[in-house]
Image (cartoon, coloured by chain):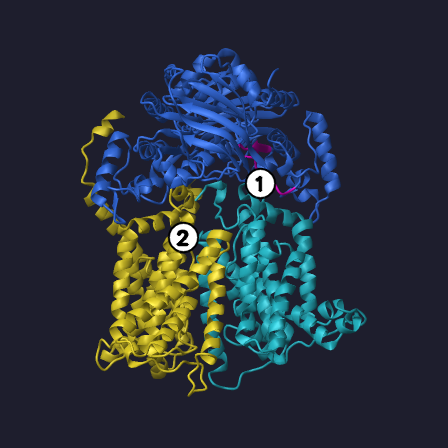
Amino acid sequence: MREAGAKPARPLGAERKLKISKGLRADFLSSFIAFALALVIGAAIIAAMGKDPLKAYAALLDGAVGNRNSLAETFLRAIPLSLAGIGVAIAFRAGAFNVGAEGQLFIGAMASAWVGLSFPSLPPILLLPLMGLTAMVAGGLWAGIAGALKAWMNASEMINTIMLNYIAVFLVSFLVHGPLQDPSSPLGQTARLPRAAYLPIMLPGTRLHGGLVLAVAAALLASLFLWRSAWGFRIRVVGKNTFAAQASGMRVNGVMVSALVVSGMLAGLAGFCEAAGVQHRMIENISPGYGYTAIVVALLGQTNPIGVFAAAVLFAALQIGASTMESAVGVPSSVITVIQYLVVLLLIGRGAFDLIRGKVMALSRREKG
Amino acid sequence: MKDHVERPGDAGTPLLSMRGISVAYGALRANDGIDLDVGAGEVQALLGENGAGKTTLMKALVGLAPIEGGSIEFDGKDISDISPLVARNAGIGMVHQHFMLIPTLTVAQNLCIGLRSEGYPFPNYRKITAKISGLSERYALKVDPSARVADLSVGEQQRVEIIKALYRGARLLVLDEPTSVLIPQEIEGLFEIIRNLSAQGTAVIFISHKLNEVMSISRNITILRRGKVAATRRTSETSAKELARLMVGYEMGDLPAAPAISESSPPVARIEGLRFVDSRKVKKLNGVDIEVRAGEIHGIAGVDGNGQVELARILAGILAASSGTIWLDGKDITRLDVARRIRSGLSYIPGDRQRTGLVMDLSVRDNMTLKLSDRPPYAVHGFLDFGKIRAMVEESIRDYNIDCADSGQEARTLSGGNQQKLVLSRELRSDPRLIVAVQPTQGLDISATNYVHSMLLERQRKGCAILLISTELDEVLSLSNRISVMYEGRLMGTFDRDSADRETIGLLMAGKQHA
Amino acid sequence: MLGMISSPVVNGFLSASMRLAIPILLAALGGVYNERSGVLNIGMEGMMIVGSLVGFVAAYFIHDLWFGVLAAAASGVLLGLILGFFVISLSANQVVAGISLNLLCMGVTSLLFRVVFGVGTAAPRVNPFAAVPIPFLGDIPVVGPLFFRQSPLGYITYALVILSFFVIYRTSWGLSIIATGENPEAAETLGVNVVRTRYAALMISGGLCALGGVFLSVDSTGLFIDNMTAGRGYIALALLILGRRHPFGLLAAALMFGAADAVQLRTQILNIRIPFQFMLMLPYILTMVVLAVFVRRIDSPAALGVHYKHGGEKE
């Protein structure tokens, strides 16, 4: 067997690249198939309602990307989905289930609005970063509660992040109906933010704001972080095998908590974008479930930050197109919600094909034997 | 090949007849066209190295392995379409190496799981207890039906397993490496039970890789090698030497001898008064003192579960000791975390390489990088330098002769031997001062085992201190300069290699100071 | 002293505690089956909300509350089967599959409710079950209002608690479930069909979760509201830990959560000066406290959450 050692060193780098792109292609393919199948099932549901699925999807597409404004709306919607989704993906990579992006988003938005209202005289160049940082710190701390409970008490971070969602929503509800309520309105909202706290508009005449830059940057930096940094390497190792990670000298708890905190920071940043970029104040319904959709987006994007961004744009298009579809064809927009979640079930159910193939093969073997 | 298989013809049709059994796990062919015959009341040994396919064949027999081809006949009936239920109804029982008992339930409850005949839907425990007493008496197998399995000793649990099989009407009993969990003195008791069973007509298949056991208990021996039948022999007509040759395929040479160490070589590691109480308040370590000198392999012998795993994990820094001190090169490392211990020169080769040794889902390269993610030049300013890492990985693959397609291959897809080489390459590359190696050759074939042994000996020659923890007494005896015996969290004694004899060590492994 | 114990305020509080405890109790009771058999059911929340809707719709159109209850249970069993397909047959990650099921169910119920009843009309209602106090028993101080002034569905819940205790600890099938959860390979060698046992456990679990859900719609309120389960399916997961996966333990634990809910409702009515949002947080904070304090103190089934393949092959 000694000869094997003498074999010429192959250009490992080239092979590695080939391998990764192969894995990427498989990931992309399975996501694509799941998405396409979900659309087909969605079409069947629409048909069952007595509507024409093709017309419905045409309206959907038109509503999502048909003109400059709808395109801007689609990307606007993709901002919170991708930021929170990338966060969820990073936690996933560390083996932690962050189902609490919704709550972290609420807390982040609240904190940034509070900063914006507290320092109305600061120039945008100072105020906006301050608000964004506060949102990240707040969101990170909120997720960190679940992380700390996981690390020290071994309490399920999945359940705790969900519980923290409810607590966050009630906390925000208290604040916007109580101490921080807009005195001129009976609604659950704060006063309007100062102009300096508005995120700049990127596409004039639309609502698309500078948060898109943050989302793209987050996707790129998160990729760099996961695959190039030592900390990202540790996150991936801990997510695959905590025992080996521990035996190699990694601080498993620290790594897991850090991933949850980073995850919460990104969700908090998503909250900042909503408060400073869209609502220009904090309202009690700041998110229609972005944090939950973010989980699906993270899975559809195969927990790859770039993939998550793409999935977020796709889902944003679905959501934005849905209302056009509802008004034009009369299909309830919640069909889209169902399609979104079908995507995940199909994605995690892709093993079904292997199962069926195995069963068929076993059967044919039995018959032969 | 078939012509070479000599079949000692027993008169009449055998009780069990397996023909051309093939089992594959993925790409691995664990069994390849195996034939096996066992007569009623016969004790048949199944001999082979780790990984020869013994356990797989027996799992196939009781319906727990995916059979691809072949036929099974039992008592004249074709039962090729085997499942656990079919095997049980036919009268085939198996005592697995890892006991198939539910620790939280009582003996009686364990016996009636899955049996409708013992009262359905409400099990009739009075009837079950009576039946257990009957079997206990008949085969001299003492057990308490109302005891919780978790509270029983290993030997008692084994008896429960045997009763369980008999309870279900087993006429053929498969014992998978039954002596591996027993101390030498308990083994004789087990052999008594086996002779008893055989005398009353129960056939026994005895799986082992230990020649002397096989020679003393069996009537016939089937030797497996690499998933195939290498030979069958009548025990009375063969010798241990011939069996050894058949088992490994060539004459076994003497194991490499460890060079003696001088009294004056300095101690590298000192462990003083190490105690550990686990979360269930069980005392796992009861004041362990060990000294490992430079250039010494210090072997820890003992039956599985006497605190060896805890000792290793505490040394590695994964588990915190309740009290005691660990010195490495004169430095107290008791309070250091894993990373700092590694930096102090400690290497750990864990016993469960698929769980603690490797990240099976990550590539060869990532597995080699595991301990380097905080260390220049591989990590600078928090970022990994892939150029440096790639050079290191390619060098390791070459030096350790790891058989993989490329460094991106997942560790899961490597063979056991190559997985262990991967672990070795990572753990030895930092020139450690102290290596803690747990069961370093478990599940490996002969050539991989020899490779691992030679790597450890090479380190020993270079002056490294090695603590070798193994339940394979032969491995400990052949590699170690000094041997300590561990029993219930205590060291029963320490011997120089030359003054160690098997008998004394066996007694100490059983917790007995003097016979 | 006795006068205070049996005052109407206290009595009302006690029976409200029980009433609020029942949905979580039913879901957690279902969880006993699947967790004892070694499978996680993170999909309890989704199964509950589907039970709420299906039961409500069936009761609304057939004008029979009991029909609604049966329909809900059936829908839960079906969801248990579906989740089983994913986590048992396809060996999907049990947490991911459960969360996905919950999100899907949340979307589907919201969609179906709008499709069936249209948007913007007055909220449809059914006449919910009425409380049926049991004579004499219902008049015992403390115990009476706590246990014996409930609706029929409440009494059925008690029966299910007792029944589950017997099934798990006294029957041979219960032994099979425990064996499957502790050591599936051993169970298989003993002739237990691990896959079938786990499917059955998940389907029972689904049915019980859906009963918990239908209790909210056709018993407590007579309404269906989007997301009306409000995380109870997740709270039930914490309850399983607090109640040590034992039916009677769950009963006690569920009462604690019911009481937390009842306190919150009372303070809203009594106009106590604590902002009501903080009272609403109570059950969720309680869940976190329970998890933090108790998780380390109980022994979980050894094979819980670990996928099992025929022949004991490890993943």
User: Residue A297's spot in the image, x, y percent?
Assistant: 35, 64
At x 31%, y 57%, the residue is A304
**Alpha carbon distance from label 2 to label 1:** 44 Å
Q: Is residue C214 located in the magenta-colored stretch of the structure?
A: no
The label on residue B188 is none
Residue A291, placed above or below residue B25: below
Amino acid type, residue under disc 2 in the picture: Met
* A231 on left or right of A107: left
Q: Is residue B100 located in the magenta-colored stretch of the structure?
A: yes
* Chain letter, disc 2 residue: A
Figure colour of chain A: yellow
Magenta residues (range): B92-105
Q: Which residue is mark 1?
A: B85
Secondary structure of the residue carrying tag 2 is: helix
At x 68%, y 39%, the residue is B108
Decide whether the magenta segment is chiefly helix, strand or loop: loop
Q: Which chain appears blue? A: B
> Is residue A37 something one can see in this rendering?
no
Residue A12, placed above or below residue C222: above
* Camera-nearest residue between B156 and C291: C291
Secondary structure of the residue carrying tag 1 is: helix
* Chain letter, disc 1 residue: B
Q: Which residue is mark 2?
A: A256
Amino acid type, residue under disc 1 in the picture: Leu
Figure colour of chain C: cyan
